[in-house]
Image: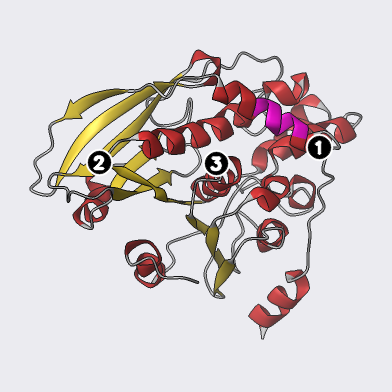
Amino acid sequence: MKAELVVDQYKNYLGSGQKPEDFDAYWDRALQELDELPLKYDLEKVNIPSGVADFYNLYFEGVGGARIRCQYICPKVRKTEKIPGIVMFHGYHGDSGDFTDKVSWAAEGFAVLAMDCRGQGGESEDRTVVKGSTLKGLIIRGVEEGPEKLYYRQVFLDTAQTARILMSMEHVDEERIYVQGASQGGALSIVCAALEPGVKKVVAQYPFLSDYRKTFEFDITSSAYEELHYWFRFRDPLHEREGEFFHTLEYIDIQHLAPRIRAEVIWAIGLEDQICYPATQFAVYNKIQSPKKMMIFPEYGHEYLPKLGDRVRGFFVNGEKL
C-alpha cells in the first residue's frame, strides 16, 4: 500500500524546477562548442589477461582543454559486421571501476566505453577554475559565477563527446549505441541521451542531479545533495542569494533536459531511497516523452537492486522493445 501511495503521489509530478527562458539556447551554445572539437582520441593498451576482451585507456580532450580518460573494452574476436556499443557512467565521487567488470559485455559482442568524470576518483582532469566554496561538492562548483562556470556543464558535454567517439569507431554500429549508469551515472546516462540524439537505449538507475528546489525540502545533510545545505550554511546563512542560487542550478537540472531524449528508457527506482528521493526522480521521468518504463522496487533504497541486471539484459543484448 505504501508503494501505491508514493507512486500515486508523484505519478503526475512535474517538479519544482523553474526552467530558465534561455535554457535551450544555453545548451545549444554548449553543443556548438562541442561540435568544434575534433573526434580525436588516443588508445593505450592495458595488459590484463583475458581470453575474451582487449583493454585500453582511451584519452580525449574535452571542452576547456581537460584530458578525459575512459576505459575501452572490446571483444578480441569480432564478427565482420559492426558491433553495438555501450557507454557507462559511474557514481558520484567514484571512477569507472575495474576493467574486468565489463568483460561480460565484451563476451556478448559489445564495445564498451566507461568514462571517468572530471576530478573525481578516476584519471580525468578537472581544469575548472572558480570562485566561491568548493568544499563540500561538485554541484555547487562554479555556482557563484553563473551558468557558464558550472562544473557539471563540462561533465554533461563530456558524456556526449564520449558517445560520439564510440559512434565514430569504424567497427561500431552507430545505430546501436546504448548508455547506462546508477546515481550520478544514471543522471549522466539521461544527459547523454538528451545531448546526443544518436543514443538509442538507456538504463538509468535512481538518477542524481534533479529537482534541486524540491530536494532542499528534504533532510539532505546525509544525502548526496548535502552540499546544497552546506553552501547556505557557509556562504549564505541568511538566504539572501537563495533565488539566484537555485536559478543557476536550473541549468544543470536534468528534468529540463529530459524532453530532448529520443531513446527508449528503462528507469529503476527504489521507493525507500533517501539519497536521491523518489520525488526528484519522478520530476525527470515524467518529462521524458520517448518510450519509457519504470521498474519499481518498493522495499529498496539507494543500493543494489536485485534482478535488475537480469531483467534488462535482453533490452541491450537482444534488442528487445519496452
Q: How is the image coloured?
A: secondary structure
Mark with earlier residue (1, 3): 3
| C-beta proximity under 8 Å, tags 2 and 1 | no
Residue 10, above or below 214? below
Circle nearer the viewer, 2 or 1: 2
Where on the picture, by quarter, is residue 273? bottom right
Q: Which residue is mark 3?
A: 196
Type of amino acid under label 2? Ile
Residue at 70% across / 43% down in the picture? 253
Residue at 53% across / 61% down in the picture? 264
Q: Which residue is mark 1?
A: 246
Q: Position of residue 248 (x, y in %)?
A: 78, 32
Q: How many angstroms separate mark 1 from mark 3 (CA)?
A: 26 Å
Q: Nearer the viewer, residue 97 or 195?
A: 195
- Range shown magenta: 25-30
Where on the picture, by quarter, is residue 192? top right
Q: How many angstroms separate mark 2 from mark 3 (CA)?
A: 21 Å
Q: Is residue 28 magenta?
A: yes
Could you tell me which quadrant the N terminus lies in? bottom right
Residue 221, above or below 244? below
Mark with earlier residue (2, 1): 2
Q: Which residue is mark 2?
A: 73
User: On the picture, is 268 further left or further right than 49?
Assistant: right
Type of amino acid under label 3? Glu
User: Please, what is the dominant secondary structure of the magenta stretch?
Assistant: helix
Q: How many angstroms separate mark 2 from mark 1 (CA)?
A: 39 Å
